[in-house]
Image (cartoon, rainbow, N blue to C red):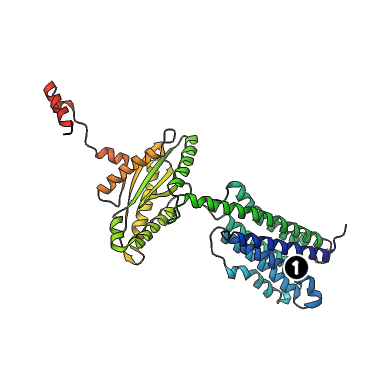
Amino acid sequence: MPLDIPTLYLVSTCITALLGIFLLVLWLQDRSVRALGYWASAYLIGGFAVAVWIVSPDLLPAAGADLASALLFTCCGLIWSGARKFHGGEASVGGAVAGALVWLVATRMPELMQWDNSRVIISSLIITVYAVLTAIELRRDRRNPRGGKASQARALLIPVMHGVIFLSPIFTTTLFASAAPIAVNGFFPLFALLTLLYVVGTAFIVVVMAKEHSALIHKTAAMSDHLTGLFNRRGFFEAAEKLVLAQRKLGQPVTVMMFDLDHFKSINDRFGHEVGDEALQAFAATASTSMRLHDVVGRLGGEEFAAILPGGTETALMVAERVRSAFEMRGVEISGHAMNATVSVGISESLADVAHVQTMLARADRALYAAKKNGRNRICTEKDVRDAAPAAPSPEVFGTTEDAMAANIADAVPA
């Protein structure tokens, strides 16, 4: 059955504009997902671009098609910018309009435009580049993947659909090189229909991603420390238990580290609590970037931080030293103040089969106390504490008589 191109244009305009309004209303209801605003703008501009295509033969015969194409490329750029915002990045205005600028420059080059289907091929390449960039952005959130594997699969499905559909004209022109230009032969209506289906499907996927993102924001707020952005005590223990369970299945050990900023009370007394908060934020950022993807770090309260990681003491020593040395460099000056802030670290290891997070934290805290007692800005393990403990006295020291034993017991009983 033949497909009427003007009808497809009209249907595409209406549906794209309605989806744009739908996304805009969702964004106005929940401003926490800022990417929705960019995606809504992209759909509205896309609908306007198709409308320009409809009227261009009569009202804009000279440059209407080029203007419509430029608007569509801007639409793709906004989708990419929305993907950047979705994971907390900064939107790139220049990047969003770069495709449109490339198109406008290319259409002013007669030697390039003289080939059959050159416009379709160039536009397909521009859109595919945006699809690849969008895929990269949606995969960039390494420490907190949104919504698990299912959400990540949906995030990749959008740009994959994008690339396959908009690369199809290139394959068509290659396989059917002798055919008439694609804009007037039977392939274009099919291409337009696929694009329409893609637009509708993508909108629903975007809504699902946005809803999952919004739900995750509320859940994360309850489990995050508002000052540092790390796990709070509740979030840390929940994540720690999951890590212990995973290590238990593998039969591998886990290690807990306790961090305490050295002389933090003095920092507050000298510079004020606001600067003290900035010192805590500086350490949190240092610890987060110095640790590995599967390590869990959180703030337990005050200047005390904790981390749990898969592996034994040797692995933890490398990670702890990376954090300690990085913060020693970062703490030389904080918020314009010469501070020379440092951190002490205590380490406790346990087999996952018998690991209890609260008990391991208590043991790591004893090692942390030893690190502070021995001069601060250092790392101390449970083994270091045991090695430094005085040896138990042998029986020969006290003799073997009952009087000597009684005397020893009497000395041991507090007055």
Residue 56 is at least partly visible in this image: yes
Residue at the image point whose x is 57% and y is 47% from the top: 148
Residue 229 picture location, percent across and down? 45, 55
Residue at the image point whose x is 46% and y is 51% from the top: 224
Which residue is labeled 1 in the image?
Answer: 50
**10 Å neighbourhood of mark 1: few (<14), some, or many (≥20)?**
many
Q: Closer to the camera, 226 or 101?
A: 226
Q: Quadrant of the C terminus?
A: top left
| Looking at the image, residue 215 lies above or below residue 179 | above
Is residue 244 left or right of 188 when viewed as pictured?
left
Q: Closer to the camera, 363 or 97?
A: 363
**Res 4 quadrant in image:** bottom right
Residue at the image point whose x is 67% and y is 67% from the top: 73
Instruction: Identify which amino acid the numbered label 1 is placed on.
Output: Val
As drawn, which residue projects farthest toward the right? 1
Residue 216 picture location, percent across and down? 55, 51
Residue 384 picture location, percent across and down? 29, 41
Numbered disc 1: secondary structure = helix
Is residue 357 left or right of 379 when viewed as pictured?
right
Question: What is the tally of numbered marks visible in this picture?
Answer: 1
Residue 44 picture location, percent across and down? 69, 66
Is residue 407 left or right of 14 when viewed as pictured?
left
Q: Quadrant of the N terminus?
A: bottom right
Residue 143 is at least partly visible in this image: no
**Res 114 quadrant in image:** bottom right
| Looking at the image, residue 68 lies above or below residue 303 | below
